[in-house]
Amino acid sequence: MIAMRRLTLGALVLLLAPVLMATGHGDAGSGTQASRVSLTVAALRGPTGVGVAPYLADGSVAGEAATVSFEIVPDPGTMVARLASGEAAVGMLPSNVVAQLYNRDVPVRIAAVTLWGLMYVVGTDESIRQWTDLEGRTVQAVGQGATPDILARHLLARNGLDPDADVTLSFRYPPVELAQLVIAGTVDLAILPEPFVTQILSRRDDARVLLNFQTEWARFYGERYPQTAIVVRADAAQEHPEAVREALALIEAGWRQVHADPEAAGAMVADSNLGLPGPVVTAALDRFNADYVPVAAARDALNRFFSVLADFDPRAVGGAVPDNGIYLSLPEGGSR
């Protein structure tokens, strides 16, 4: 069932929550519309959650079918737990992690793609002009075993390099520390996502974006790669499709608002618990490659992404390319 969240009625709502969860009805925001359900959207701290920044100050939005509340979770592991337990009906995850969950029979469906890659090789060594220039070099990287690592190894291989022999990928530092080491001049080559890239560029004049994962992927495959997906629990979609539509529409509208006024978006992020400096978000927004694309339009890119990852390392997608059941299909009206 769609998870219920405390909005304004304090302890009384906490007492009533099990009943509301069981019925799927009630309006914790106003208590005036018995048919309105409460639905929780969980957003990841960091760039993935920037699209919900317009809603974080109030915490919830009441629509015709649902009162949608928003929470920020610190990492993908917590997000998986929220979705698997039903505490959140809608969430955000790396798209290959969604494939892994789906292949483990966790009832999640992809509703849209929002981030189309935000990984870069950044540093001060301007001799690095193409991927083959990394041969024989040590590159400090992040996300060992996760999407950044898999993509780096895949792109190196596509450029004729053995990622285990020709290049040394080191995972000694977390992103925050690695960015500071680049700024200090201790590390001259790093693989990092935004907004760390912009933090480096803003504090070190000789730092550059040396290689761009997104353009390299497009060079080989002719399209962007779908890094981050909006996911919906299958039971929520079946039981409350209009509520899910409203939640998805809010996420899409949030991204539109962020793009329309990056400075205002930075201020909203600074006042939130997304863990990002507001001015950095304003400056880095273009390199987030954020674009809300409903699953109907993103399906081909997702299928290609899953196929490429499965060919390179089947574990990246949970053993096999997921079937089309992974894609959200809402009753009476499709995926929007």
Image (cartoon, helix red, strand yellow):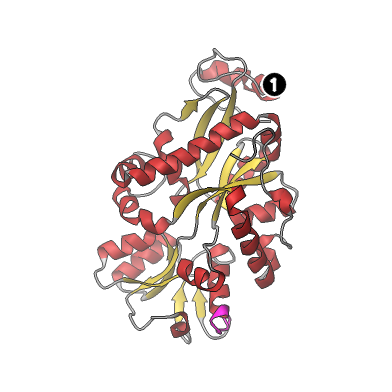
Which image quarter is the N terminus in?
A: top right
Up the image or down, 131 lies above or below 7; here it is below
State the extent of the magenta-drawn residues as a range: 158-164
Based on the displayed image, in which of its 4 quarters is residue 86 positioned? top right
Which residue extends farthest left? 205
Residue beneath the point at 69% across and 34% down: 331
Residue beneath the point at 65% across and 63% down: 316
Give the x, y percent position of residue 139: 45, 76
Residue 129 on the magenta span = no
Q: Main secondary structure of the magenta part?
A: loop
**Left or right of 249 in this view: 244:** right
Element under disc 1: helix
Q: Amino acid at mark 1?
A: Thr
Which image quarter is the C terminus in?
A: top right
Q: Is residue 320 visible?
A: yes
Q: Nearer the viewer, residue 171 or 221?
A: 221
**Left or right of 96 in this view: 318:** right
Q: Nearer the viewer, residue 171 or 198?
A: 198
Residue 162 on the magenta span = yes
Residue beneath the point at 48% across and 72% down: 216
**Label 1: how many residues lie within 10 Å, few (<14), some (14-19) or many (20+)?**
few
Q: Is residue 78 visible?
A: no
Give the x, y percent position of residue 132: 47, 84
